[in-house]
Image (spheres, rainbow, N blue to C red):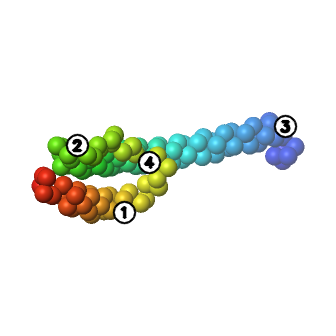
Amino acid sequence: MIEPLDDPVAQYKEILDIPRQAAQKLTELERKRTIELAAEIRDADKQIKSATARETQASQEIQAWWRQVIARMTGLHWITPGRPPDAAQEAPPKTLDDYMADIQPRTDDFLAALRKAAWPRRTP
């Protein structure tokens, strides 16, 4: 019987088996990474949709508060409302809840001050 090391065909097959095993391992790694990337993309898409919905909701609430203030200022010729506030692009998203919680009390304070300044001329 010929030893595997002395058999050129066996040596050739062994040499060819190394790249085949490497290709299989690479294929498996690529398949796993593809699955991981698909999950990451899916998660990122969910986060984007959530952030977009939250942005839309915050924008609508702020516009509603702005309209409320403008409605109270109607008929007061000594004060002009100006233009609506723009979104602060540099604001960290994590503090949105704090900002939103702060808007209503400040709106109420402004409306109270406006009511006080307008009285007796007009009571909104």
Q: Up-down: is 117 above or below 32?
A: below
Sequence-wise first label, 4 or 2: 2
Determine the secondary structure under disc 3. Answer: helix
What residue does disc 4 label?
Answer: 88
Q: Residue 2 at x, y = what percent?
A: 83, 44
The residue wearing badge 1 is: 98
Residue that label 2 marks: 77
Do residues under tags 3 and 4 come within 8 Å of each other at their CB atoms? no
Q: Secondary structure at mark 1?
A: helix
Residue beneath disc 3: 8
Which badge, 3 or 4, comes first in the chain's sequence? 3
Q: CA distance from mark 4 to mark 2?
A: 29 Å
Check disc 4 and give the amino acid type: Ala
> Which badge, 3 or 1, comes first in the chain's sequence?
3
Q: Amino acid at mark 1?
A: Asp
Frontmost of labels 2 and 1 is 2
Task: Classify residue 28 by image quadrant.
Answer: top right
Mark 4, residues whose alpha carbon is within 10 Å: few (<14), some, or many (≥20)? few
Task: State which quadrant residue 74 falls in.
Answer: top left
Residue lying farthest to the right in this orientation:
6
Q: Earlier in the sequence, mark 2 or mark 1?
A: 2
Residue ID at (73%, 39%)? 19
